[in-house]
Image: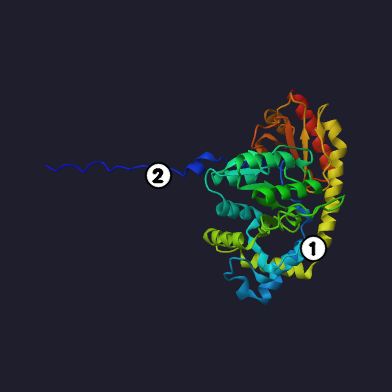
Amino acid sequence: MTVADPAPTRAPVPPFAARARSIGGSPVRDILAVTARPELINFAGGLPAPELFDVEGISAAYRAVLAEVPAQALQYSTTEGEPGLRATLAARTSARGLATGPDDLLVTTGSQQALSLLATALLEPGDTVLVENPCYLAALQVFGFAGARVVAVPGDRHGVDPEALEELVVRERPKLLYTVPTFQNPTGRTLPAERRAAVAAVAGRHGLWIIEDDPYGELRFEGERVPWITSYPGAEDRTVLLGSLSKVMAPGLRLGWLRAPADLRRVCAVAKQAADLHTPTVNQLAAARYLADSDLDGHVTRVAAVYRERRDAMLAGLADALPAGSVWDRPEGGMFLWARLPKSYDTTELLPTVLRQEVAYVPGAPFYAAEPDLSTLRLCFVTQTPEEIGEGLRRMRAGLAAGR
Protein backbone atom coordinates (compact mmCIF):
# COMPACT_ATOMS: atom_id res chain seq x y z
CA MET A 1 0.00 0.00 0.00
CA THR A 2 1.41 3.38 -0.98
CA VAL A 3 0.75 6.68 0.70
CA ALA A 4 -0.17 9.53 -1.61
CA ASP A 5 2.09 12.52 -1.59
CA PRO A 6 0.61 15.40 0.39
CA ALA A 7 -1.07 18.09 -1.65
CA PRO A 8 1.49 20.72 -2.62
CA THR A 9 1.20 23.97 -0.75
CA ARG A 10 1.18 27.33 -2.52
CA ALA A 11 2.39 30.24 -0.41
CA PRO A 12 1.35 33.78 -1.28
CA VAL A 13 3.91 36.09 -2.82
CA PRO A 14 5.28 38.89 -0.62
CA PRO A 15 3.18 42.07 -0.53
CA PHE A 16 3.81 45.22 -2.54
CA ALA A 17 5.90 47.94 -1.00
CA ALA A 18 4.03 50.13 1.45
CA ARG A 19 4.48 53.19 -0.80
CA ALA A 20 2.83 51.35 -3.71
CA ARG A 21 -0.10 50.32 -1.53
CA SER A 22 -0.62 53.82 -0.19
CA ILE A 23 -0.57 55.79 -3.45
CA GLY A 24 -3.54 55.61 -5.78
CA GLY A 25 -3.69 56.32 -9.49
CA SER A 26 -4.23 59.68 -11.11
CA PRO A 27 -7.87 60.83 -10.92
CA VAL A 28 -7.26 62.83 -14.11
CA ARG A 29 -6.15 59.69 -15.97
CA ASP A 30 -9.15 57.83 -14.60
CA ILE A 31 -11.43 60.56 -15.93
CA LEU A 32 -9.71 60.54 -19.32
CA ALA A 33 -10.30 56.80 -19.59
CA VAL A 34 -14.03 57.47 -19.22
CA THR A 35 -14.02 60.42 -21.60
CA ALA A 36 -12.36 58.87 -24.66
CA ARG A 37 -15.60 58.81 -26.65
CA PRO A 38 -15.30 60.97 -29.78
CA GLU A 39 -18.74 62.53 -29.26
CA LEU A 40 -17.70 63.91 -25.88
CA ILE A 41 -16.27 67.43 -25.64
CA ASN A 42 -13.35 66.99 -23.29
CA PHE A 43 -12.18 69.92 -21.18
CA ALA A 44 -10.58 67.44 -18.75
CA GLY A 45 -7.36 66.66 -20.58
CA GLY A 46 -4.01 68.33 -20.25
CA LEU A 47 -2.88 67.49 -23.76
CA PRO A 48 -1.60 69.90 -26.41
CA ALA A 49 -3.68 70.20 -29.58
CA PRO A 50 -2.48 67.40 -31.91
CA GLU A 51 -3.56 69.16 -35.10
CA LEU A 52 -0.95 71.83 -34.35
CA PHE A 53 2.03 69.45 -34.15
CA ASP A 54 4.66 70.18 -36.80
CA VAL A 55 4.39 66.66 -38.16
CA GLU A 56 6.35 67.33 -41.34
CA GLY A 57 9.17 69.13 -39.59
CA ILE A 58 9.52 66.44 -36.91
CA SER A 59 9.27 63.65 -39.50
CA ALA A 60 11.98 65.32 -41.60
CA ALA A 61 14.23 65.50 -38.55
CA TYR A 62 13.84 61.78 -37.87
CA ARG A 63 14.41 60.91 -41.55
CA ALA A 64 17.59 62.98 -41.62
CA VAL A 65 18.97 61.46 -38.45
CA LEU A 66 18.23 57.88 -39.49
CA ALA A 67 19.69 58.47 -42.97
CA GLU A 68 22.82 60.34 -41.89
CA VAL A 69 23.80 58.89 -38.48
CA PRO A 70 21.84 55.64 -38.11
CA ALA A 71 24.46 53.85 -36.04
CA GLN A 72 24.58 56.70 -33.53
CA ALA A 73 20.79 57.18 -33.50
CA LEU A 74 20.10 53.53 -32.71
CA GLN A 75 22.93 53.07 -30.19
CA TYR A 76 23.17 53.66 -26.46
CA SER A 77 23.93 57.21 -25.41
CA THR A 78 25.35 58.99 -22.38
CA THR A 79 23.21 59.37 -19.29
CA GLU A 80 23.60 63.15 -19.28
CA GLY A 81 22.15 63.47 -22.80
CA GLU A 82 23.33 64.00 -26.35
CA PRO A 83 25.85 66.88 -26.41
CA GLY A 84 24.24 68.57 -29.42
CA LEU A 85 20.82 68.68 -27.81
CA ARG A 86 22.20 69.92 -24.51
CA ALA A 87 24.12 72.66 -26.32
CA THR A 88 20.99 73.81 -28.14
CA LEU A 89 18.82 73.74 -25.02
CA ALA A 90 21.49 75.64 -23.09
CA ALA A 91 21.62 78.31 -25.79
CA ARG A 92 17.83 78.69 -25.71
CA THR A 93 17.91 79.03 -21.92
CA SER A 94 20.70 81.61 -22.10
CA ALA A 95 18.77 83.59 -24.71
CA ARG A 96 15.87 83.82 -22.26
CA GLY A 97 18.08 85.50 -19.68
CA LEU A 98 19.68 82.68 -17.67
CA ALA A 99 23.31 81.99 -18.58
CA THR A 100 23.54 78.22 -19.07
CA GLY A 101 26.14 75.86 -20.49
CA PRO A 102 25.55 72.37 -21.89
CA ASP A 103 27.10 70.77 -18.82
CA ASP A 104 24.53 72.51 -16.60
CA LEU A 105 21.79 70.31 -18.05
CA LEU A 106 20.68 66.70 -17.67
CA VAL A 107 18.30 65.42 -20.36
CA THR A 108 15.41 63.43 -18.92
CA THR A 109 12.61 61.28 -20.31
CA GLY A 110 10.09 64.07 -19.97
CA SER A 111 10.25 66.57 -17.14
CA GLN A 112 8.13 64.15 -15.10
CA GLN A 113 11.18 61.91 -14.84
CA ALA A 114 13.16 64.90 -13.61
CA LEU A 115 10.75 65.18 -10.69
CA SER A 116 11.21 61.50 -9.85
CA LEU A 117 14.99 61.79 -10.02
CA LEU A 118 14.95 64.80 -7.72
CA ALA A 119 12.74 63.00 -5.23
CA THR A 120 15.21 60.12 -5.25
CA ALA A 121 18.16 62.47 -4.81
CA LEU A 122 16.73 64.77 -2.15
CA LEU A 123 14.05 63.05 -0.10
CA GLU A 124 14.08 60.54 2.72
CA PRO A 125 10.79 59.05 3.93
CA GLY A 126 9.22 61.52 6.33
CA ASP A 127 10.92 64.60 4.87
CA THR A 128 8.69 67.62 4.41
CA VAL A 129 7.95 69.04 0.97
CA LEU A 130 6.15 72.34 0.43
CA VAL A 131 3.81 72.72 -2.54
CA GLU A 132 1.41 75.24 -3.97
CA ASN A 133 -2.26 75.03 -3.08
CA PRO A 134 -3.63 73.65 -5.36
CA CYS A 135 -0.70 71.78 -6.93
CA TYR A 136 0.20 69.86 -10.10
CA LEU A 137 -1.29 66.43 -9.44
CA ALA A 138 1.57 64.27 -10.74
CA ALA A 139 4.01 66.08 -8.43
CA LEU A 140 1.85 65.09 -5.47
CA GLN A 141 2.11 61.48 -6.68
CA VAL A 142 5.92 61.66 -6.94
CA PHE A 143 6.31 63.08 -3.45
CA GLY A 144 3.83 60.56 -2.08
CA PHE A 145 5.82 57.66 -3.56
CA ALA A 146 8.95 59.09 -1.97
CA GLY A 147 7.25 58.91 1.43
CA ALA A 148 7.39 62.66 1.90
CA ARG A 149 5.13 64.67 4.14
CA VAL A 150 3.49 67.19 1.80
CA VAL A 151 2.44 70.57 3.19
CA ALA A 152 0.55 73.19 1.17
CA VAL A 153 1.70 76.80 1.26
CA PRO A 154 -1.16 79.31 1.59
CA GLY A 155 -1.61 81.68 -1.32
CA ASP A 156 -4.13 83.58 -3.38
CA ARG A 157 -5.03 84.13 -7.03
CA HIS A 158 -1.46 85.33 -7.65
CA GLY A 159 0.19 82.23 -6.17
CA VAL A 160 2.32 81.44 -3.13
CA ASP A 161 2.32 83.97 -0.28
CA PRO A 162 6.03 84.54 0.55
CA GLU A 163 5.31 85.49 4.18
CA ALA A 164 3.34 82.29 4.71
CA LEU A 165 6.13 80.40 2.98
CA GLU A 166 8.73 81.78 5.37
CA GLU A 167 6.61 80.90 8.39
CA LEU A 168 6.28 77.32 7.15
CA VAL A 169 9.98 77.03 6.38
CA VAL A 170 10.87 78.14 9.90
CA ARG A 171 8.30 75.86 11.52
CA GLU A 172 8.43 72.75 9.33
CA ARG A 173 12.10 72.71 8.18
CA PRO A 174 11.23 71.34 4.72
CA LYS A 175 13.71 69.97 2.21
CA LEU A 176 12.20 71.67 -0.81
CA LEU A 177 9.49 73.83 -2.35
CA TYR A 178 7.92 72.64 -5.60
CA THR A 179 6.32 75.31 -7.78
CA VAL A 180 5.00 75.88 -11.29
CA PRO A 181 5.19 79.67 -11.21
CA THR A 182 4.19 80.41 -14.81
CA PHE A 183 0.72 79.44 -16.14
CA GLN A 184 0.40 76.91 -13.35
CA ASN A 185 -1.33 73.58 -13.69
CA PRO A 186 -4.14 73.54 -12.57
CA THR A 187 -4.92 77.24 -12.00
CA GLY A 188 -3.26 78.98 -14.96
CA ARG A 189 -1.95 81.69 -12.60
CA THR A 190 1.50 83.30 -12.80
CA LEU A 191 3.57 84.28 -9.78
CA PRO A 192 4.47 88.00 -10.01
CA ALA A 193 8.09 89.12 -10.16
CA GLU A 194 8.13 90.62 -6.67
CA ARG A 195 6.89 87.36 -5.15
CA ARG A 196 9.50 85.39 -7.10
CA ALA A 197 12.20 87.59 -5.64
CA ALA A 198 10.74 87.09 -2.17
CA VAL A 199 10.59 83.29 -2.60
CA ALA A 200 14.23 83.28 -3.72
CA ALA A 201 15.20 85.34 -0.68
CA VAL A 202 13.41 82.92 1.68
CA ALA A 203 15.33 80.02 0.14
CA GLY A 204 18.57 81.91 0.54
CA ARG A 205 17.97 82.87 4.16
CA HIS A 206 16.77 79.50 5.42
CA GLY A 207 18.36 76.82 3.26
CA LEU A 208 15.71 75.39 0.97
CA TRP A 209 15.77 73.67 -2.39
CA ILE A 210 13.37 75.08 -4.98
CA ILE A 211 12.12 72.96 -7.87
CA GLU A 212 10.88 75.41 -10.50
CA ASP A 213 8.86 73.54 -13.12
CA ASP A 214 8.33 75.45 -16.37
CA PRO A 215 6.51 73.35 -18.99
CA TYR A 216 4.18 76.14 -20.13
CA GLY A 217 6.26 79.33 -19.93
CA GLU A 218 6.75 79.74 -23.68
CA LEU A 219 2.98 79.61 -24.32
CA ARG A 220 2.39 83.26 -23.49
CA PHE A 221 -0.55 85.05 -25.16
CA GLU A 222 -0.26 88.47 -23.58
CA GLY A 223 1.65 90.41 -20.94
CA GLU A 224 5.37 90.49 -20.25
CA ARG A 225 7.54 87.49 -19.53
CA VAL A 226 8.54 87.14 -15.86
CA PRO A 227 12.12 85.94 -15.11
CA TRP A 228 12.65 82.50 -13.62
CA ILE A 229 12.91 82.30 -9.83
CA THR A 230 16.40 80.88 -10.19
CA SER A 231 17.59 84.18 -11.67
CA TYR A 232 16.84 86.12 -8.45
CA PRO A 233 19.37 86.64 -5.64
CA GLY A 234 19.31 83.88 -3.06
CA ALA A 235 18.11 81.14 -5.41
CA GLU A 236 21.11 80.71 -7.71
CA ASP A 237 22.73 77.72 -6.01
CA ARG A 238 19.58 76.02 -4.70
CA THR A 239 17.06 76.06 -7.55
CA VAL A 240 16.44 73.29 -10.07
CA LEU A 241 14.78 74.52 -13.27
CA LEU A 242 12.78 71.93 -15.21
CA GLY A 243 12.04 72.30 -18.91
CA SER A 244 10.21 70.25 -21.51
CA LEU A 245 9.55 69.99 -25.24
CA SER A 246 6.19 68.31 -24.60
CA LYS A 247 3.99 71.41 -24.79
CA VAL A 248 5.94 73.30 -27.47
CA MET A 249 7.00 70.48 -29.80
CA ALA A 250 5.34 67.11 -29.04
CA PRO A 251 4.79 65.11 -25.83
CA GLY A 252 5.40 61.78 -27.57
CA LEU A 253 9.09 62.60 -27.81
CA ARG A 254 9.29 62.39 -23.99
CA LEU A 255 12.07 64.97 -23.83
CA GLY A 256 12.67 67.14 -20.80
CA TRP A 257 15.67 68.41 -18.88
CA LEU A 258 16.78 69.76 -15.57
CA ARG A 259 19.21 72.58 -14.88
CA ALA A 260 20.75 72.10 -11.45
CA PRO A 261 23.84 72.82 -9.38
CA ALA A 262 26.67 70.44 -10.23
CA ASP A 263 26.56 68.24 -7.12
CA LEU A 264 22.81 67.67 -7.35
CA ARG A 265 22.98 67.13 -11.09
CA ARG A 266 25.57 64.38 -10.64
CA VAL A 267 23.37 62.60 -8.08
CA CYS A 268 20.41 62.83 -10.46
CA ALA A 269 22.56 61.33 -13.24
CA VAL A 270 23.36 58.34 -11.03
CA ALA A 271 19.64 57.97 -10.23
CA LYS A 272 18.85 58.11 -13.94
CA GLN A 273 21.38 55.37 -14.66
CA ALA A 274 19.41 53.17 -12.31
CA ALA A 275 16.09 54.17 -13.91
CA ASP A 276 16.62 53.98 -17.68
CA LEU A 277 20.36 54.42 -18.44
CA HIS A 278 19.56 57.30 -20.78
CA THR A 279 16.76 59.00 -22.69
CA PRO A 280 16.23 57.45 -26.18
CA THR A 281 19.06 58.50 -28.48
CA VAL A 282 17.03 58.77 -31.67
CA ASN A 283 14.54 61.14 -30.03
CA GLN A 284 17.32 63.36 -28.72
CA LEU A 285 19.10 63.51 -32.08
CA ALA A 286 15.85 64.19 -33.94
CA ALA A 287 14.96 66.99 -31.53
CA ALA A 288 18.41 68.53 -31.94
CA ARG A 289 18.06 68.30 -35.72
CA TYR A 290 14.61 69.85 -35.59
CA LEU A 291 15.87 72.72 -33.46
CA ALA A 292 18.69 73.29 -35.95
CA ASP A 293 16.61 73.09 -39.13
CA SER A 294 13.20 74.45 -38.08
CA ASP A 295 11.91 77.59 -36.42
CA LEU A 296 10.59 76.37 -33.07
CA ASP A 297 10.01 79.91 -31.85
CA GLY A 298 7.88 80.65 -34.90
CA HIS A 299 5.97 77.42 -34.38
CA VAL A 300 5.32 78.30 -30.73
CA THR A 301 4.09 81.74 -31.76
CA ARG A 302 1.58 80.17 -34.14
CA VAL A 303 0.43 77.66 -31.52
CA ALA A 304 0.05 80.38 -28.89
CA ALA A 305 -2.10 82.43 -31.27
CA VAL A 306 -4.51 79.50 -31.69
CA TYR A 307 -4.53 78.80 -27.96
CA ARG A 308 -5.28 82.45 -27.25
CA GLU A 309 -8.32 82.32 -29.53
CA ARG A 310 -9.54 79.21 -27.74
CA ARG A 311 -8.95 80.73 -24.31
CA ASP A 312 -10.95 83.78 -25.36
CA ALA A 313 -13.80 81.57 -26.55
CA MET A 314 -13.91 79.83 -23.18
CA LEU A 315 -13.76 83.10 -21.25
CA ALA A 316 -16.59 84.50 -23.38
CA GLY A 317 -18.90 81.60 -22.51
CA LEU A 318 -18.18 80.98 -18.85
CA ALA A 319 -20.62 83.53 -17.44
CA ASP A 320 -23.53 81.70 -19.08
CA ALA A 321 -22.16 78.20 -18.43
CA LEU A 322 -21.39 78.43 -14.71
CA PRO A 323 -23.87 79.21 -11.92
CA ALA A 324 -24.24 82.74 -10.59
CA GLY A 325 -21.56 83.56 -8.06
CA SER A 326 -18.83 81.57 -9.81
CA VAL A 327 -15.40 83.18 -10.20
CA TRP A 328 -12.46 82.55 -12.50
CA ASP A 329 -9.25 84.22 -13.63
CA ARG A 330 -7.93 85.20 -17.05
CA PRO A 331 -4.68 83.27 -17.64
CA GLU A 332 -2.10 85.10 -19.73
CA GLY A 333 -0.95 81.86 -21.33
CA GLY A 334 -0.66 78.13 -20.90
CA MET A 335 -3.45 75.59 -21.24
CA PHE A 336 -5.72 75.79 -18.19
CA LEU A 337 -8.45 77.83 -16.61
CA TRP A 338 -9.53 77.40 -12.97
CA ALA A 339 -13.03 78.14 -11.77
CA ARG A 340 -14.66 78.21 -8.34
CA LEU A 341 -18.40 77.66 -8.12
CA PRO A 342 -20.53 78.73 -5.14
CA LYS A 343 -19.73 76.79 -1.97
CA SER A 344 -22.89 74.71 -2.22
CA TYR A 345 -21.55 72.97 -5.35
CA ASP A 346 -19.42 69.81 -5.20
CA THR A 347 -17.81 69.36 -8.62
CA THR A 348 -16.84 65.73 -7.92
CA GLU A 349 -20.42 64.75 -7.15
CA LEU A 350 -21.70 66.71 -10.14
CA LEU A 351 -19.31 65.20 -12.69
CA PRO A 352 -21.36 62.05 -13.52
CA THR A 353 -24.39 64.22 -14.31
CA VAL A 354 -22.30 66.55 -16.44
CA LEU A 355 -20.74 63.58 -18.29
CA ARG A 356 -24.22 62.50 -19.34
CA GLN A 357 -24.36 65.74 -21.31
CA GLU A 358 -21.25 64.57 -23.24
CA VAL A 359 -18.84 67.10 -21.75
CA ALA A 360 -16.10 66.70 -19.14
CA TYR A 361 -14.02 68.73 -16.71
CA VAL A 362 -11.62 67.79 -13.89
CA PRO A 363 -12.88 68.36 -10.32
CA GLY A 364 -10.49 70.48 -8.32
CA ALA A 365 -10.31 68.31 -5.19
CA PRO A 366 -7.45 65.96 -6.29
CA PHE A 367 -5.10 68.90 -6.80
CA TYR A 368 -5.06 69.84 -3.12
CA ALA A 369 -2.49 68.56 -0.63
CA ALA A 370 -4.46 70.24 2.16
CA GLU A 371 -8.22 70.46 2.70
CA PRO A 372 -9.70 70.60 -0.80
CA ASP A 373 -12.08 73.23 -2.10
CA LEU A 374 -14.84 70.97 -3.41
CA SER A 375 -16.40 73.74 -5.48
CA THR A 376 -13.43 74.10 -7.86
CA LEU A 377 -12.76 72.65 -11.30
CA ARG A 378 -10.09 72.76 -14.02
CA LEU A 379 -10.85 73.38 -17.68
CA CYS A 380 -8.36 72.78 -20.50
CA PHE A 381 -9.14 75.11 -23.40
CA VAL A 382 -6.55 74.13 -26.03
CA THR A 383 -7.85 70.95 -27.65
CA GLN A 384 -11.22 72.21 -28.94
CA THR A 385 -12.09 74.78 -31.56
CA PRO A 386 -13.97 77.93 -30.47
CA GLU A 387 -17.17 76.42 -31.86
CA GLU A 388 -16.65 73.19 -29.91
CA ILE A 389 -15.86 75.19 -26.78
CA GLY A 390 -19.12 77.10 -27.14
CA GLU A 391 -21.08 73.88 -27.52
CA GLY A 392 -19.21 72.25 -24.63
CA LEU A 393 -20.04 75.14 -22.32
CA ARG A 394 -23.71 74.93 -23.28
CA ARG A 395 -23.65 71.25 -22.38
CA MET A 396 -21.90 72.02 -19.11
CA ARG A 397 -24.57 74.54 -18.16
CA ALA A 398 -27.23 71.89 -18.74
CA GLY A 399 -25.31 69.30 -16.75
CA LEU A 400 -24.65 71.54 -13.79
CA ALA A 401 -28.30 72.59 -13.70
CA ALA A 402 -29.47 68.96 -13.90
CA GLY A 403 -27.23 67.98 -11.00
CA ARG A 404 -28.74 70.50 -8.57
Which colour assignment does the render follow? Answer: rainbow
Label 2 crowding class (10 Å Cα cut-off): few <14, some 14-19, many 20+?
few
Q: Position of residue 48 (x, y in %)?
A: 75, 51
Q: CA distance from mark 1 to mark 2?
A: 50 Å
- Depth check: give the residue in front, 335 or 66: 335
State the residue at coordinates (72%, 46%). 46
Q: Position of residue 132 (x, y in %)?
A: 69, 42
Secondary structure of residue under mark 2: loop
The amino acid pointed to by label 1 is: Leu
Q: Which mark is residue 296?
A: 1
State the residue at coordinates (14%, 43%). 2
Secondary structure of residue under mark 1: helix
Which residue is at the far left? 1
- Depth check: give the residue in front, 317 or 114: 114
Label 1 crowding class (10 Å Cα cut-off): few <14, some 14-19, many 20+?
some
Q: Quadrant of the N terminus?
A: top left
Which residue is at the far front? 205
Q: Which mark is residue 370?
A: none
Instruction: Give the answer, above or below, for where 327 lies relative to 62.
Output: above
The amino acid pointed to by label 2 is: Pro
State the residue at coordinates (64%, 41%). 170
Q: Position of residue 153 (x, y in %)?
A: 68, 39
- Quadrant of the rendered image containing residue 99: bottom right
Q: Quadrant of the C terminus?
A: top right
- Depth check: give the residue in front, 357 or 182: 182
Q: Which mark is residue 14?
A: 2
- Is residue 69 in view from this perspective? yes
- Is residue 27 in view from this perspective? no
Instruction: Specify whether 37 is left or right of 124.
Output: right
Q: Position of residue 25 (x, y in %)?
A: 58, 41
First in sequence, mark 1 or 2: give its number.
Answer: 2
